[in-house]
Amino acid sequence: MKRKKTKVIHIGNKVIGGGNPILIQSMTNTKTEDITATIAQINKLEAAGCDIIRAAVPTMEAAKAFAEIKKSIQIPLVADIHFDYRLAIAAIKYGADKIRINPGNIGGKAQLTEVVNEAKSHNIPVRVGVNSGSLEKDILNKYNGVTAEGLVESALLKVQMIEELGYDNLVISIKSSDVMMAVTAHEKITALSDYPLHVGITEAGTIISGNIKSAIGLSLILNQGIGDTIRVSLTGDPLEEIKAAKIILKTLGLRKGGIEIISCPTCGRCEIDLIGLANKVENMAADIQTSSELKVAVMGCAVNGPGEAKEADIGIAGGKGEGIIIKKGQVIKKLPESELLEALRKEIIRLV
């Protein structure tokens, strides 16, 4: 697909916009003030494939924690600010690579000016964040409630506020929990603005519902060439957000490399704990980083498995207490079920 060439923006050691690869974001759920826990979570997320991480800054202590956190992580750190402009200024001074604000709730023009001037002095981008729960009363009245048009108008008005202060190092985020409203809003804003877009479905839900809603919404948006960074917002472990985002990008052909797991549905012929095995394989594969394209199959039937897995690079299939290793549709090894996972891991390592 042809991607829109948005404005190039530098976020720490990462670059977005201008056709650069779409980057994956997540947000810590530790207390930012707990420096040790926050660093540990960020490093786990980076190892899983997170490109940019955001942390909440609800207190001055959290803002000051950025200085220590930055010393022990490699990916850009973004400060999430609500209401108190002083926290935004402090977060920038203590090393934030980007700040996320809603110019409408950060204070008046004088306060916004101070924040923008601080961002200017450190040359860091400002993410203008608007969502369906933050629309101004006049816009709600104008459009008789929350609409895609209202989201776009609100975001562009806030962008204009910062542009009038002489700054255009900006990223825009317009999110809604209504999937189709979010899609429409992104379609509309991309025709009116060249700033990079951070895309996501806000308050998407738990692992199951959140993944489904995010996959649908993000795919409809990204497949039109819209979007420069993404987040799969889930109520759960942020590591699950990274797993889902990687699969979405890979499925759409927007990210190359890595291990793709394919597994058959369970049926009456299955004579192995296929569900448990598939989950173990997925978790094991997530810890193996590779730039190679590798397809791994997990099949529940030793009779049909080799044929069903013939398009995979490597795979396993199980029977009664035993299983087979399959390479390109051919059985290369037969061994006890208890040894399947480790044998598969070794074969994957050889291939990558």
Image (spheres, rainbow, N blue to C red):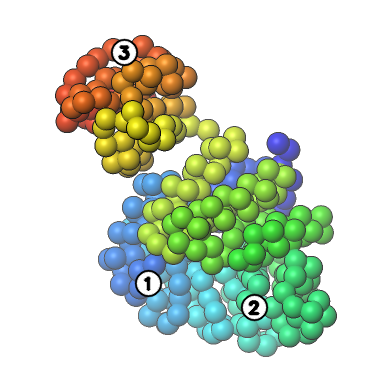
Residue drawn 51% across the image and 58% down it: 210
The residue identified by callout 2 is 134
Q: Which mark is residue 331?
A: 3
- Front residue of 164/331: it is 331
In the image, which is nearer the foreground, mark 3 or mark 2? 3
Residue type highlighted by circle 1: Thr
Residue 52 seen by the camera: no
Q: Is residue 190 left or right of residue 344?
A: right
Q: Which mark is residue 32?
A: 1
Q: Residues within 10 Å of mark 2 (few under 14, many from 20)?
A: some
Give the image location of residue 309, x and y in percent: 42, 21
Q: Is residue 231 above or below residue 161?
A: above
In the image, which is nearer the foreground, mark 1 or mark 2? 2
Q: Earlier in the sequence, mark 1 or mark 2?
A: 1
Give the image location of residue 300, x and y in percent: 33, 29
Q: Can you say which quadrant of the picture contains the C terminus?
A: top left
Q: Is residue 284 left or right of residue 241?
A: left
- Front residue of 337/154: it is 337
- Give the Cα distance between marks 1 and 2: 24 Å
Q: Earlier in the sequence, mark 3 or mark 1?
A: 1
Give the image location of residue 217, x and y in percent: 63, 53
Give the image location of residue 40, x and y in percent: 30, 59
- Give the Cα distance between marks 3 and 1: 51 Å
Place residue 183 in its image quadrant. bottom right
- Give the Cα distance between marks 3 and 2: 57 Å
